[in-house]
Image: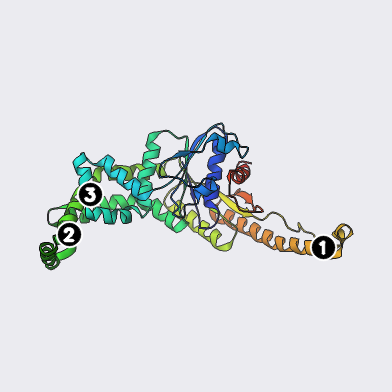
Amino acid sequence: MCVCVGAGGVGKTTVSAALALGLATRGKKVAVVSIDPARRLAGALGLDELSGEPHRIEEHTLAAQGIELEGELWAMILDSKGTFDALIGRLAESERVREEILSNRIYRELSSAVAGSQEFTAVAKLHELHRSGEWDVIVLDTPPSRDALDFLDAPERLTRFLEGRALRVLSSPGGVTRGVLGRGAGLMLSVFARVTGVNLVGELSGFFGSLAGLTDGFRERAHGVEQLLRDRGTGFLIVTSPEHEPVEEAVFLGGQLEREEMELSGVIVNRFQEVGLDGCDPRELTQLLSEQLGMPLAARVAGNLADFDVLARRDRESVARLEEALGEGDPVLVPRLDGDVQDLGGLAAIAEQLFA
C-alpha cells in the first residue's frame, strides 16, 4: 500500500492519481482511494463523479486520451456514512440487531458524526480492501497533513475507546444515566418521555448497548489496519510544493512518521520551477536576444526569465531543506506545468515524471 500525505493545495490528489495510473500502465491492478473531503479525485481522473465503491476506469476512456494500460486502474471516494452502515451490517450478529442499530434514532443522528471524522471509516474501508486481496497496490490519498495525522493515529484511538471504561459504563444497564446524564437529568428526561412519548434515555442506552456488541469486530479492524500501516509492504510518500509553508509541513510530517515508526518511502516535490537564467546576466541575455526579437521584446523575455530565476533558486533551496531535514537525498521533482491537470492526459504527463 502507498499512502500519500502532505499539506493542502500541493497537488496531492493529482499526484496520487498519477502514481496509480503509472503503476497500472506498468501492469499492476491498482485502486486509488481518496479520503479527502474536497472530493477532487473524480475530476483528476476525467470523471463526473465517483462512488463509495471501487470503480474501474474503462479502457475506452483511457484510449480517448491515448493511454494503454497493461494492468487495471480503479478509483473510489470514501463514503463515510455508507461505509459505516455497511460495517454495522457485517458486524451485527443477526438481522434483528442490524435493524435495531440502523433504525435507532440516536444512531441515525450521530452516525454521520461518528463516521464523518473520516479516519474512522477509512480504517474500516482500508481493512476491507486489503483483506479482499484483489489489488496489487492500493494508493491512498489523504486529507491535508494535520488531518492525515489523525488518520494515522485512528486505529490506536479507536482501540483505546473500545477497551476503555467509558464504553463499558455507557453500554451497561442504566449506564447512560450514571455515566453521562446524572440522576437529576435522568429524572427530568423520564418526565420528558412521559409527556412527549420520546424516550431519549432508552434510545441512548439501546444505541450504546448495541455498539458494545460490535466491539470485537471494530477492535479487529483497528488492530489490522495498525499492523498494515506499519507493515514493510506499506510506504508513505510525502507530497509537497516548494513554497515555505508546505515544505515546513512536510518536515513536520516526516518527523511524525519517524516517531510513529512508519516507513517514509520518498518525497515528491510538485510544481518545481526548473527554468531560469541558468547563470546568465539579464543584460547580456537581452543583447543576445535583441537581434532576433528586437530590443523591447528581448528585454521582456529576459525580465520574465529573471522572475522565473527567483522561483528556481527558491525551489532549489526548498529541496535542499527537505534533503537535510528528512534525510531524503533524491526527492522526485515534478516540474511546474503550463496549466492545471484536468484530464487523464495531464495525469499521464505527471506519471511520466514520477517514473522517469
Residue 329: x %, y % from top left = 60, 49
Nearer to us in this view, 294 or 3: 294
Residue 268: x %, y % from top left = 57, 50
User: Which disc, if any, is residue 216?
Assistant: none
Nearer to us in this view, 286 or 205: 205
For label 2, the SS is helix
For label 1, the SS is helix
The residue beneath circle 2 is 200
Q: Residues within 10 Å of mark 2 (few under 14, many from 20)?
A: some
Query: Mark 3 vs mark 2: which is more N-terminal?
Result: 3
The residue beneath circle 1 is 297
Indicate the amino acid at tag 2: Leu
The residue beneath circle 3 is 103
For label 3, the SS is helix
**Residue drawn at (56%, 38%) of the image:** 61
Residue 65: x %, y % from top left = 61, 40
Indicate the amino acid at tag 1: Leu
Query: Mark 1 vs mark 3: which is more N-terminal?
Result: 3
